Image (tube, rainbow, N blue to C red):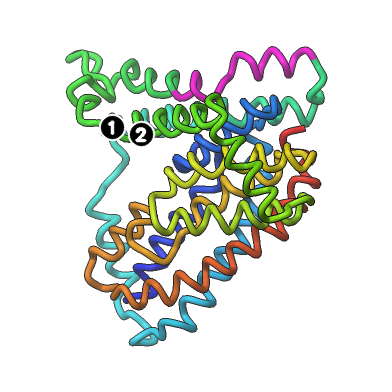
């Protein structure tokens, strides 16, 4: 039971890295990196970079979780029958489900389309520049949400997929949290505090190469993510890492991206991510089990980012 629940929590953390909109640290880190370096990170480039790293981490998750948390039973009987019965109770897809699926498909297609254009026409083409400027991820997200207010589920009664009473129940505080993280990071940079901390850390630690700065960024982001939320980790660490790299006269792109990825790799404590808190709150996972399993994944995750991310950046040309 512990292995199943932990896999749900850790799988959600790792899976959140797959797209720029998959988790708050991605949004915050990406915004800060683009602002500091002037290098645009396309949706498709992010996915191409993250997919191999996530695939390797998923394999590690399964192996280590099963080794550290031995399954109490070998097989759960009646699973196929249970799934078939529940699927039958759902019935056919409703009109609202179909329109939601259509809006989702349109949104994802428009997110990926500029990356496809870049592969075909090249990033220097005028067509790519026009498409990427107009199909900003934020604009596409608003467009996708707007479709839900327009697509009808019952035209005679003027009912649409989503109405404002539904939208009013959205957790708007979470959206404000995203924005606050980006603002906080920008203030660290604009006030000079990030540069002061970065230069002091660079002098004290003697960080002079991309490898060591990337390693420092990944480890620092994971440590802070264990003691605070992963959102706060990205908002604090990325603005500090960028001036450290600049002080060492190296490109800050890889170290800052490493800090962004590592912010989602806090696996030891319930406070690290909401999914960890949910797993712990289930009562199935003792805190000692989460710490033991999470410590192993913190180490594997740090090594994967330090060694694998620079390679993937070189292969995909992300940010170039």
Q: Which residue is mark 2?
A: 177
**Percent coordinates x, y for residue 291 in the rendering:** 40, 72
Is mark 1 in CB contact (under 8 Å) with mark 2? Answer: yes
Residue 269 lies in what quarter of the image? bottom left
Using the rendered image of the protein, determine whether residue 55 is visible from the camera's viewpoint.
yes
Which residue is found at the position 74% from the left and 50% from the top? 312
Using the rendered image of the protein, determine whether residue 47 is visible from the camera's viewpoint.
no
**Percent coordinates x, y for residue 250 in the rendering:** 79, 41
**Percent coordinates x, y for residue 218 in the rendering:** 60, 55
The magenta-colored residue range is 126-141
Which residue is found at the position 57% from the left and 25% from the top? 110
Residue 289 lies in what quarter of the image? bottom left
Task: Answer few, some or many: residues within 10 Å of disc 2's Cα (few below 14, many 20 plus, some between 14 and 19).
Answer: some
Task: Looking at the picture, tell me which residue is in the foreground, 290 or 119.
Answer: 290
Picture quarter with the N terminus:
bottom left
Depicted 253 relative to depicted 183: above or below: below
Q: How many marks?
A: 2
Q: Identify the secondary structure beneath mark 1.
A: helix
Q: Which residue is mark 1?
A: 173
Look at the image and say whether residue 178 sits in the magenta stretch: no
Depicted 243 relative to depicted 36: above or below: below
Q: Identify the secondary structure beneath mark 2.
A: helix
Tell me if 320 is positioned left or right of 80 in this view: right
Return the mark for residue 230: none
Residue 171 lies in what quarter of the image? top left
Task: Looking at the picture, tell me which residue is in the foreground, 105 or 255.
Answer: 255
Which residue is found at the position 79% from the left and 28% from the top? 120
Majority SS type along the magenta span: helix
Which residue is found at the position 43% from the left and 77% from the top? 292
Look at the image and say whether residue 136 sits in the magenta stretch: yes
Depicted 288 relative to depicted 120: above or below: below
Picture quarter with the C terminus:
top right
């Amino acid at each position: 039971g512990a292995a199943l629940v932990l896999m749900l929590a850790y799988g959600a953390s790792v899976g959140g890295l797959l797209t720029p909109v998959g988790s708050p640290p991605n949004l915050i880190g990406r915004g800060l990196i683009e602002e500091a370096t002037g290098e645009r990170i396309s949706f498709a480039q992010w996915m191409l970079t993250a997919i191999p790293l996530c695939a390797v981490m998923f394999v590690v998750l399964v192996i280590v979780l099963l080794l550290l948390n031995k399954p109490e039973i070998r097989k759960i009987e009646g699973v196929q029958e249970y799934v078939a019965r529940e699927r039958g109770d759902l019935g056919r897809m409703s009109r609202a489900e179909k329109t939601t699926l259509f809006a989702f498909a349109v949104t994802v297609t428009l997110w990926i389309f500029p990356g496809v254009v870049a592969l075909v026409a090249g990033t220097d083409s005028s067509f790519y520049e026009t498409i990427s400027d107009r199909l900003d991820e934020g604009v596409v997200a608003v467009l996708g949400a707007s479709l839900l207010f327009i697509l009808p589920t019952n035209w005679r009664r003027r009912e649409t997929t989503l109405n404002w009473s539904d939208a009013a129940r959205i957790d708007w505080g979470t959206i404000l949290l995203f924005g606050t993280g980006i603002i906080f990071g920008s203030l660290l940079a604009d006030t000079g505090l990030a540069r002061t901390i970065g230069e002091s850390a660079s002098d004290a630690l003697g960080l002079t190469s991309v490898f060591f700065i990337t390693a420092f960024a990944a480890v620092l982001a994971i440590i802070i993510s264990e003691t605070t939320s992963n959102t706060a980790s990205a908002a604090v660490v990325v603005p500090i890492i960028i001036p450290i790299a600049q002080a060492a006269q190296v490109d800050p792109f890889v170290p800052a991206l490493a800090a962004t990825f590592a912010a989602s790799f806090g696996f030891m404590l319930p406070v690290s991510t909401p999914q960890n808190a949910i797993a712990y709150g289930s009562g199935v996972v003792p805190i000692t089990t989460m710490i033991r399993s999470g410590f192993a994944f913190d180490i594997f995750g740090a090594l994967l980012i330090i060694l694998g991310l620079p390679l993937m950046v070189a292969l995909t040309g992300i940010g170039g």
